[in-house]
Image (cartoon, grey):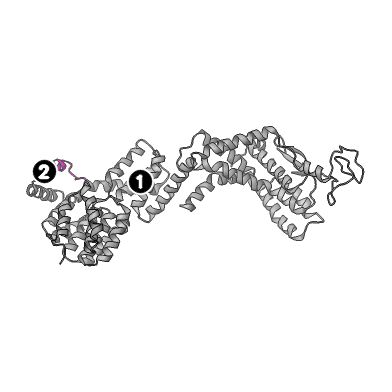
Amino acid sequence: MEVNDNIPAQGTAGNDSCQKCGIPSYEEGYKIRLCAPCRRGLSRYPIKKEVLWAALGVGLLVLFSLAKFPKSFTAGLNYERALKLEEQHKYISAEAALRQTLKDYPEYLQGACHYMIAAYYNDHLAEADSAREHWAGQTFNKEKELIERVNEVLGGFKNYHFEDTAFHFVRDSLGNDNIAYRAALKQYVQQHPKDNLANYLLADQYFETHEYTATDSLCGQVLTAAPDFQPAYGLLAAAYREEKQYEKATAICNRWLKLNAESVDAHVSLVKILLKQKQDKQALEKALYAYGLEPDNASIMQALTLAYHFNKQTKERDALLARVKQNADTSWLGNLQGVIAGTIPYRD
Amino acid sequence: MFFIPGIIITIVTFPGVVAHELAHQLFCRLCGVAVFEVKYFQAANPAGYVIHEPVRNPVHQLWIGIGPFIVNTLLAAIIAFPAAIPVMKFSSGNSLDYLLLYLSISIGMHAFPSIGDAKTMWNTLWHGEDTPKWLKVVTVPVVGIIYAGALGSFFWLDLFYGMGVSLGLPVLLIKMMA
């Protein structure tokens, strides 16, 4: 930018006339004498055609690029939201947001890592495992903290497998012979006392036969060795609940919720504890919250049906019960119908 | 820190020079100041210029002087926005994204007014008889910042600014909105 005090004289300018066109009037206050139309004309100095065409071209490119902008913007927003949700241990919401991001950017490695973490904490192990496909053969050194978390989760996967993989076949071969399975499991645990999955499954066996002290002991052992192994929290809370140790059961659920603030199973456990304590209104509130998180989850549908039942909301109960019947997981349906019919006692 | 002759940087980032001069021209038009000549780009020093008449209202000189800072920054941000997210967040940019980012960074790099702009502002505003005191007070830091920016360009400050506007701003905005 430069300032020029002179203008090449174009008219026959005198001292009292416009230096450009020579008419005998000019605007006061300027160093260069120009009439208003000449000044306006010069201020609108023409822009070169090449520059205009280039600007138009850039404008078109930007417009073209804007067509895909909503997709990338939403994906970016979902990703950042997911990171914040993950920090708050709200893994259900984080997983949903990351699923959206990966739908648009399936090759995004960091997104796949965070998705795996969220899915793992939601006990969606198949989804967590599928996320691993994204980083096959890729090197990734940028975010050490993320790598450490991924490694933690990968370590956690081991808790869902027997140390001795052959025992999977033993279990499958025993089919529905529960007595033989229990005996084999006991023997296996004696041989592999640090196998978290086996200890958990044995605890589950004890729970089924109402041996709650043994359940408590084994679950405690598992949770000391693997504090992220969430199924053990559910079993331990259920054992305390059945022993009517409601405070302890609630404390376990709260520990579980610190691990995953949106754990549907932890909320379902709390709903059952509250119903046992005849705190029906609070149970319904919690059940509705959990239902909002995962409306298609069978266990929350069943817990909400129970909560409706004890709150005497029969219309809502029956509507939900109809949905429970259509669900693939009807494992608890008989019990649920028994409790509703009054043939199975649920609480004192 | 490595040294690349200024003329090479200017040639590589010529879209920014064009936008810079267009910004001066635009503010001349908005302020009704007569323009006598515009050079959008040349491979010489200065790389571009706008020759205009002395202003009647000293505030107009300030606007014309800082015009490129406003226009180039806005243009750089707008051009970069759709391209920056796929490249910066998802490492999945295509050639159009990279072209837009090149344009955006080039334009952002030339947002700072030049030393020539600062000299013109200083001569017109600080030494101007009609300049109100408040405007003289405003002029000092503005010219100071321009000189600091020119000094900083030895350390690639202009490049960092261009990258900040083009790459950092969209990512920051998304983080704030999330």
For label 1, the residue is A115
- Residue A172 location, x and y as percent? 13, 42
Amino acid at dot 1: Tyr
Say which quadrant the C terminus of chain A sits in: bottom left
Q: Chain of mark 2?
A: A
Q: Which residues are magenta?
A: A161-173
Question: In the rendered image, which residue does mark 2 sit on?
Answer: A175
- Relative to residue A161, is residue A143 drawn left or right? right
User: Viewer-proximal residue, A296 or B5?
Assistant: A296
Percent across and percent down for residue A202 are 14, 52
Closer to the camera in the image, B95 or B35: B35
Q: Residue at x 38, y 46 (%)?
A: A98
Q: Is residue A164 magenta?
A: yes
Q: What is the quadrant of the N terminus of chain A in the image?
A: top right
User: Toward the viewer: A145 or B1?
Assistant: A145
Residue B129 image point, x, y percent? 82, 56
Q: Residue furthest front?
A: A315
Q: Residue at x 57, y 46 (%)?
A: B165
Kindly tell me whether residue B80 is visible in this rendering.
Answer: yes
Write down the quadrant of residue B102 in the picture. Answer: top right
B111 relative to B86 in the view: left or right: right
Circle 2 packing at 10 Å, graded few (<14), some (14-19), many (20+), is few
Q: Is residue B46 left or right of residue A187?
A: right
Does the magenta-highlighted stretch encompass residue A198? no
Q: Is residue A328 left or right of residue A259?
A: left
